Image (cartoon, rainbow, N blue to C red):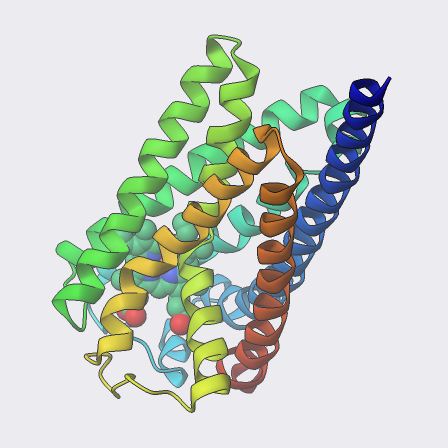
Amino acid sequence: MTVGLIEGLHSHSLKTASRWLSRSMAACFGAMVIGQLAFALFIALFYYPSTLTGNLAAWNTKPLITGHVPGDGMGNAAFAFHVLGAGLMTVSGWFQFLPAIRRRWPALHRWNGRFFLLSSSLIAINGLLLVWVRGSWLTLAGGLGVSFNGLIILICGARAFLHARARDFAAHRRWAIRLFVAASGVWFIRIFYMAWGITTGGIGIEPRLSGPFDQIVAFANTLLPLAVLELYFRAERARSALPRYSVAFLLALSAVVILGGSAGAWLVMWSPYI
Ligand code: HEM
């Protein structure tokens, strides 16, 4: 009787903790979509008009590492591909997570998934060329950090694809979510800069991005969100309520940081240029 009661209470609290965990994950994802909407809006209103009308010199009205170089047809084309692809890829990422689309239009889910996978891989390869062939890097840590991000995107994409083909959908789900998080790395970097700037006044940030914060964030933009995601995967499988509540709290906190950082990025990094 007592054992039954304890088991009943245990499973009740586990269910409540699970509910909080998925609500916090939804809040975190919602915050990411809001922040990425601002990023996509900037790309659509700044890069699309200038690139599609051939006014590539307009890119340089914004601080960039290389940007438009007169006479560098290949380099300019590579950057045009990068920013145009980045806008489409960002929007396609959100749709992949809408349960209604997965349930009602599975074919759309599959085609959008293929598009996200292909576009994120091509942008990663194209980004690697921008860094190591065009020479668009400010510091070695910055160049290596963004290249690490590109490599992780390629690995997550390959694993998501292979698990889907093998019809191992549990593994496919985990690698597809990792891909989405890794492909959000260059967006996360901007969120981290703004959240850090707002809370500390920018300690460790140097004008040419050579400060300690700059070097850490070059890798943390990939590693930190992926680490939080791993904690979420573990909490989902945890047999007690505490890990689920702890990760739910961490995700709720992340949602607040993401919203604050996104508001800052919109005000400082994006809206002044559109
Ligand atoms: C897959 C997700 C990615 C997205 C959504 C993305 C998006 C962008 C955007 C919007 C810009 C313009 C920056 C601005 O206006 O301030 C940019 C610049 C740049 N990206 Fe990416 N990017 C991604 C991945 C990568 C990767 C993996 C690399 C390198 C391996 C990379 C290398 C670069 C470089 C070097 C620039 C600066 C070019 C310059 O200033 O001349 N990107 N990216």
Q: How many marks?
A: 0
Q: Residue furthest bottom?
A: 201
Percent from the top left, x then y, of residue 90? 55, 51
Nearest to the observer: residue 196 or residue 271: 196
Q: Is residue 185 above or below residue 97?
A: below
Q: Residue at x 83, y 22 (%)?
A: 2
Residue 93 to residue 185: above or below: above
**Residue sitting nearer the eye, 78 or 96:** 96
215 vs 187, left or right, is left
> In terms of depth relative to the viewer, which is nearer, 215 or 79?
215
Q: Position of residue 254 (x, y in %)?
A: 57, 61
Q: Residue at x 32, y 46 (%)?
A: 124
Quadrant of the snapshot with the C terminus? bottom right
| Residue in the image at 69% along x and 26% along y | 108
The answer to whether 131 is drawn above or below residue 227 in the figure is: below
Does 257 sit above or below residue 252?
below
